[in-house]
Image (tube, rainbow, N blue to C red):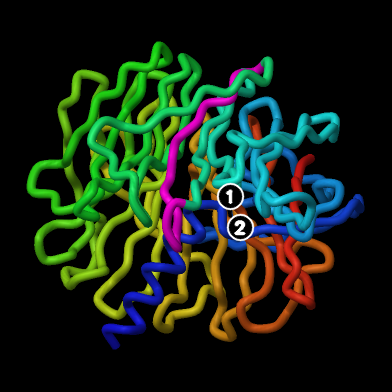
Amino acid sequence: MKKARIALRSLERERRLGGMGFARMAVLCFCFAFVSGTPAQQPEVAGTGDTTNPTFTTFDVPAATGTSVSGINAVGTIVGSYGHTTGTVSVSGFVRAASGAITSFDASSGTLYLGTTALGINTAGALTGYYTIDVAPFGAYYGFVRDVDGTISTFNASGAGTGSGQGTLAWSINAAGAVTGDYIDASGVVHGFVRAAGGTTTTFDAPGAAWTYGYSINDGGVIAGSYADATGVEHGFARGADGAITSFDAPGAGTTAEQGTNPLSINNAGTIGGYYKDANYVFHGFVRTASGAITTFDVPGAGTGFGQGTYVYGINAAGVIAGYYPDANGRYHGFVRNPGGVIATFEAPGAGTAEGYGTYAFGISYPWAVAGSYSDANGVEHGYVLAP
């Protein structure tokens, strides 16, 4: 069981780091399958009043061996990374405009440079993420910011290690250009950080934390993230722009190592979306308002076995949530949930149906457009955007 928990945690981390993705061009119409706690209610697509069939657009970065989508901003610009076999670099970042135009980039260069993972995007189109240097078998990580004009600034958080598996991982960027993320020090301990647009970096640890992860920052400078205590139990936190940290646990969250609460996204109203793991290592979604009220939920059809359940990854300005769920057979499906609790599930065209394959949703724009990746029957991943 311990080895299984470790494997599960590694898989979670891989997904958070943009480890899903690959794609090809096609535009198809698709009907949502809706479920609601109140069957008499006429469901709306993500609470927008749109009851028409949305449209899938799938895509691949040119020459990609796989396309991994990490997120989408309010105006429909998508960020992600892709694998390729050209040159000495195996992974590069990309940005896809709402028009469909794709621009690829590398955060660094040189013989020791391994690749770029692009994770966060703000409304203006500035990006953040990390790149890897081959100084040891598993490399070291460094953060970067890519401005709208394509200018790239690289950085390492104060105290970050420079050895194998150490360094800086940038996750999210707000409208002002402030970045949050986490860094691994020379002892392998993880700490949170926030970097101002001017380059000043402030590091932090949640009270009682053994490890601290900063995952999402809103335009007010409020950060949502998680921390593990000395026993390995995970807790959520919200860190105000003044540095004050409020910790919380979702009702039903497990209290054993590798269990607990993981907030992954925050909107400008301070509403946080994420998931928690219960005592059986089953995943469930939650929404937490700025006042602290927490609502938990499960997507109908989500599996109830170890590592199965409901994963929440994105929340937009209106409080609409996007995520995915593995069913009882281990196949993955996407979903959106509106603030009223109405849930719509969907499948990307061409998604594989075998265990471990399917559709993953990582981001949602405003009023709504969902972006993510899907793996086909051969395990190759592709990007998609689902929009009205």
Q: Which mark is residue 30?
A: none
Q: Which image quadrant is residue 90 in?
A: bottom right
**Residue at horizontal 52%, vertical 73%?**
302
Q: Is residue 10 visible?
A: yes
Left or right of 365? Residue 266 is left
Quadrant showing the N terminus: bottom left
Query: For this rendering, which residue is in front, 9 or 202?
Result: 202
Query: For this rendering, which residue is in front, 68 or 34?
Result: 68
Q: In the picture shown, does residue 12 fall above or below 184?
A: below
Q: Position of residue 149 (x, y in %)?
A: 68, 15
| Residues tagged 2 and 1 counted as in contact (Cβ below 8 A) | no
Amino acid type at image mark 1: Leu
Left or right of 190? Residue 336 is right
Query: For this rendering, which residue is in front, 46 or 79?
Result: 79
Q: Earlier in the sequence, mark 2 or mark 1?
A: 1
Q: Position of residue 94 (x, y in %)?
A: 70, 38
Residue range of the region highlighted in magenta in the rendering:
135-148
User: Rounded to the nearest whole Å, what is the CA distance between mark 2 and mark 1?
Assistant: 33 Å
Q: Which element carries disc 1, helix, strand or loop?
A: strand
Query: For this rendering, which residue is in front, 169 or 277?
Result: 169
Amino acid type at image mark 2: Phe
Read off the residue under disc 2. Answer: 335
Left or right of 342? Residue 13 is left
In the image, is residue 348 part of the stretch drawn in magenta? no
Quadrant showing the C terminus: top right
Q: Which mark is residue 114?
A: 1
Q: Which element carries disc 2, helix, strand or loop?
A: strand
Q: Position of residue 46 (x, y in %)?
A: 62, 44
